[in-house]
């Protein structure tokens, strides 16, 4: 069986759209209608025409698409592809956190469950966190679940942000010496890192960028070599979009096992079976949507 031809046939038959995150396997990115970062995918998901969407990413991303499109069928090729950072805080823990800081605004990274979004005033992604938090000037802000993105925004805005101690296990594997060694070997290379990296890693890099911002930066930069301190899946897009430039992965360990769960076979099966679809409790979805809509309105 020619799996690519079968996917194309089923996709046309179901009038389906395939969305993929920048960390997906190269062959999955290649069959997607659109590949992007969390913010770009959330934006795409808010204006979908197709009745069926195959979301190649992790669960919170497909869940966000489902919340924004209650009338569409959002398929998840592997519903077990979660995000360990998103699971580092639940709704009960967030309610306790809020109770300890009455009057504070709550901003949640989009890497969170629908229940946590439902308890939050606004969502953000790594691409718009600063813009979102600027709207809460003069107010105490609780930021969940990523301590590192929360600290980046606090540093950039020059104010205190009370962060939840969550983190990404994949970005936690990246060490400052990984960047420093590559810089020594390639002195002309610009080091780009993701805000989910810890401060010593960010300090060793030249730029702190979301995955979408990395793609835009690499395109417009005059530099010819780049050290890429984030999940390795993004190298595929960077190399495709910049064939004249060289990209060095920061470490062989920067691989998100959940992002890699989506394979061409699973995309084929979910198109064939029109399942599994993402389901969100409608009462939670309505409340979570307010936080997502607020983010989209401000970004
Ligand atoms: P981006 O929003 O930069 O794509 O990041 C999403 C993510 O999960 C990073 O680990
Ligand atoms: Fe979650 Fe980290 Fe994987 Fe992103 S890279 S989906 S934050 S575990």
Image: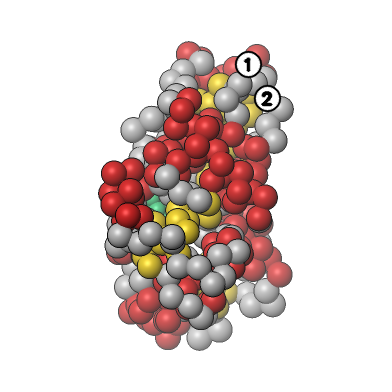
For the question of whether residue 17 can be seen, the reply is yes
The foreground one among 94 and 12 is 94
The foreground one among 261 and 128 is 128
Please give the residue where the numbered disc 2 appears in the rendered image: 50
Picture quadrant of residue 54:
top right
Element carrying mark 2: loop
Left or right, 34 with respect to 2, comes to right
Element carrying mark 1: helix
Q: CA distance from mark 2 to mark 1?
A: 9 Å
Left or right, 240 with respect to 249, comes to right
- Residue at position x 48%, y 78% from top? 159
Split into 4 quadrants, where in the image is the C terminus? bottom right
- Residue at position x 44%, y 32% from top? 284
Position above or below: 151 against 38: below
Mark 2 C-beta to ligand 1 under 8 Å:
no
Residue count near mark 1 (Cα–Cα under 10 Å), binned few <14, some 14–19, many ≥20 = some
Q: How many marks?
A: 2
The x and y percentages for residue 260 are 39, 42
Numbered circle sitting on residue 14: 1
Left or right, 115 with respect to 6, comes to left
The x and y percentages for residue 69 are 60, 29
The x and y percentages for residue 247 are 53, 67
């Amino acid at each position: 069986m020619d799996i690519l031809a079968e996917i194309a046939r089923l996709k046309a038959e179901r009038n389906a759209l395939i969305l993929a995150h920048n960390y997906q396997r190269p062959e999955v990115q290649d069959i997607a209608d659109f590949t992007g970062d969390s913010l770009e995918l959330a934006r795409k998901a808010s204006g979908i025409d197709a009745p069926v969407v195959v979301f190649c990413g992790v669960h919170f991303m497909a869940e966000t698409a489902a919340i924004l499109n209650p009338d569409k069928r959002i398929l998840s090729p592997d519903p077990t592809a979660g995000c360990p950072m998103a699971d580092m805080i639940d709704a009960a823990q967030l309610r306790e956190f809020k109770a300890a800081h009455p009057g504070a605004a709550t901003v949640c990274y989009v890497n969170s469950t629908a229940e946590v979004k439902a308890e939050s005033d606004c969502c953000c992604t790594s691409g718009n966190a600063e813009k979102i938090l600027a709207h809460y000037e003069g107010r105490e802000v609780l930021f969940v679940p990523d301590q590192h993105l929360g600290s980046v925004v606090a540093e950039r805005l020059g104010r205190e942000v009370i962060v939840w101690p969550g983190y990404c296990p994949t970005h936690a594997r990246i060490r400052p010496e990984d960047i420093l060694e590559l810089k020594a070997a390639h002195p002309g290379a610009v080091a780009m890192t993701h805000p989910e990296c810890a401060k010593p890693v960010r300090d060793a890099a030249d730029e702190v960028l979301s995955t979408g911002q990395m793609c835009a930066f690499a395109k417009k930069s005059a530099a010819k070599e780049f050290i890429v301190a984030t999940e390795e899946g993004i190298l595929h897009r960077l190399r495709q979009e910049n064939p004249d430039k060289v990209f060095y992965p920061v470490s062989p360990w920067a691989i998100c096992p959940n992002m890699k769960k989506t394979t061409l076979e699973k995309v084929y099966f979910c198109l064939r079976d029109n399942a599994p679809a993402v389901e969100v409790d409608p009462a939670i979805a309505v409340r979570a949507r307010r936080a997502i809509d607020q983010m989209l309105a401000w970004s």
